[in-house]
Amino acid sequence: MTFRFITALLLAGFSLFAQTIPVAPDMGALWAADWSAKKLDHVMTLYASDAVFFPTAGGRFAGAPAIRDFFQKTLASNDPTIHMHRVAFEQSGKLAYESGEYKETIVSAGRANDYEGHYLLILRNQNGHWLIVEQTFTGGPSPAHH
């Protein structure tokens, strides 16, 4: 009886010290809302300082400053509207991934082009905040535009 009481007391004490990590939000939906609104500062709050971004056209942008510069140039000449639908999500401790499908309309020089494909986000919890550490898109023009 005493052994069970001591074991229960120890387990209760350890649980007080265990860090509770919140479930990662639907980061794709958050990113899409800010991107479509061209809120670059809000978009960048979703990234870790050492994040990496892989755009559909190829290339690699490493670090938040490089990602910001690429995004700033992209948004300067384009008006995007993107919808991201999370299909899969898994979390283990301070790491998580999210993948799904997206559809985007980009208006550039008065002309609208539709794109679709898939995305993958790798997330890390830093100081209680979920941040994107890697992001990649695949896809291209919507089939109706081939």
Image (tube, rainbow, N blue to C red):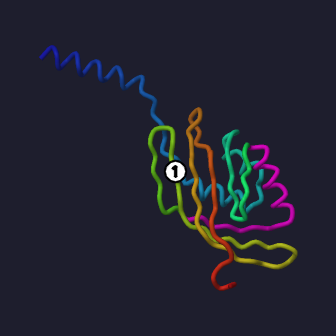
Rendered position, 11 above or below 94: above
Residue 141 falls left or right of residue 94:
right
Residue located 17% across and 20% down the image = 4
Residue 69 falls left or right of residue 125:
right
Query: 10 Å neighbourhood of mark 1: few (<14), some, or many (≥20)?
Result: many
Q: Of 120 and 128, which appears nearest the observer? A: 120
Q: How many marks?
A: 1
Rendered position, 67 above or below 127: below
Rendered position, 17 above or below 55: above
Residue located 65% across and 85% down the image = 144
Q: Of 138 and 33, which appears nearest the observer? A: 138
Picture coordinates of residue 122 (x, y %)? Answer: 57, 49
Q: In which quarter of the image is the N terminus?
A: top left
* Magenta stretch holds residue 43: no
Q: Is mark 1 on a helix, strand or loop?
A: strand
Q: Residue furthest left?
A: 1
Magenta segment main secondary structure? helix
Say which quarter of the image contains residue 45: top right
Please name the amino acid that badge 1 sits on. Answer: Tyr
Q: Give the range drawn in magenta.
A: 64-85
**Residue at which label 1 appears:** 97
Residue 16 falls left or right of residue 140:
left
Q: Which residue lies furthest to the front in this view?
A: 59
* Magenta stretch holds residue 82: yes
Picture coordinates of residue 139 (x, y %)? Answer: 63, 70
Q: In which quarter of the image is the C terminus?
A: bottom right
Residue located 78% across and 55% down the image = 71
Picture coordinates of residue 26 (x, y %)? Answer: 55, 54
Picture coordinates of residue 140 (x, y %)? Answer: 67, 73
Say which quarter of the image contains residue 103: bottom right
Residue located 57% across and 57% down the image = 120
